[in-house]
Image: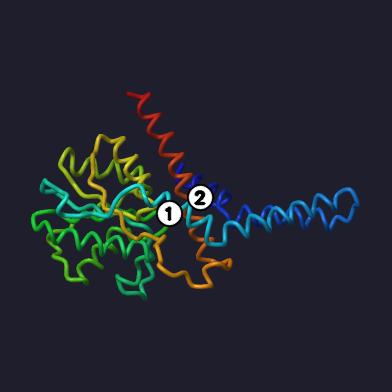
Amino acid sequence: MFLIKKIIAPFLFPVPIIVIVLGIGLIRLWRGQRKVAPKGRNWLTLGFILLLLLSTRPLPTYLLGDLEGGYRNFSPEAVTLSPAAVVVLAGGASDDPGLDPLQRLSESTLVRLAEGIRIARYYPDARLVVSGGAPFSEVSAAAMMASAAIELGFDSTRIDLEALSLDTDDQAKAIASMLGDRAFILVTSASHMPRSMRLFGSQGLKPIPAPTNRLVKEASVLHPGAYFPSAINLEHSRIFFRESLGMAWAELVVRLLAKSK
């Protein structure tokens, strides 16, 4: 099921959808029939409109900003209990042996790990749990995160690895087995937090959310370039599509789990 999701999901992301729409339009135009050509122009127009909307600032910023705004930044002052662990979910890594541990982590994973270490320093008795398997790698993301944390000066004796999970649903189940009903802080990207909280909640867990790696940031003055199409805005659109699909899958998982009980 994991592999099927990874194969099908990308076809529902912005760039593949736009490419498919433009491809249909080009095929219809190249066929050269008078009745077909106008339809080809319609498909090309639709592809252009989609590309324009999803690659310029207003729509991606609104969609992703709404997704990231569900949870506030973590504040130690707002936590009245002592957590047993700070759990950091992986967001991608490379097992390239030519890179040092820090460079192997994707940007989102590195930001999550840095936030996890920062929070863990507030709670000397809490474990730092790094979570992430190796779906397409020989080395687990958790192992690379642990190595990076040690390079950043974190105490290796405080680190626990969850290295078997393949996706967020797996991570929720694994953390439930590791921590039971003990309180813990959950660190992941702000855009990924709603899906994570839903899946962790389905396991009877009540993590304290600590969202990080916010991609939509307010600015007092916008640079003129912000109003032009860009790959960054397309990436923000992709993340929104990915998380929306992930939330739909999470809801399906939760409902199936509820029926099985």
Which mark identifies residue 65? 1
Rendered image coloring scheme: rainbow
Q: Amino acid at mark 2?
A: Phe
Residue 92 image offset from top left, x and y in percent? 38, 60
Q: Quadrant of the C terminus?
A: top left
> In this view of the protein, which residue sits in the foreground, 68 or 33?
68
Quarter-of-image position of residue 213 = bottom left
As drawn, the residue found furthest toward the right would be 34
Q: Secondary structure at mark 2?
A: helix
Residue occupying the point 23% across, 44% down: 207
Q: Amino acid at mark 1?
A: Gly
Residue 118 image offset from top left, x and y in percent? 20, 63
Residue occupying the point 77% across, 51% down: 42
Residue that label 2 marks: 241
For marks 2 and 1 on the same chain, the one whose residue lies earlier in the sequence: 1
Residue 5 image offset from top left, x and y in percent? 49, 45
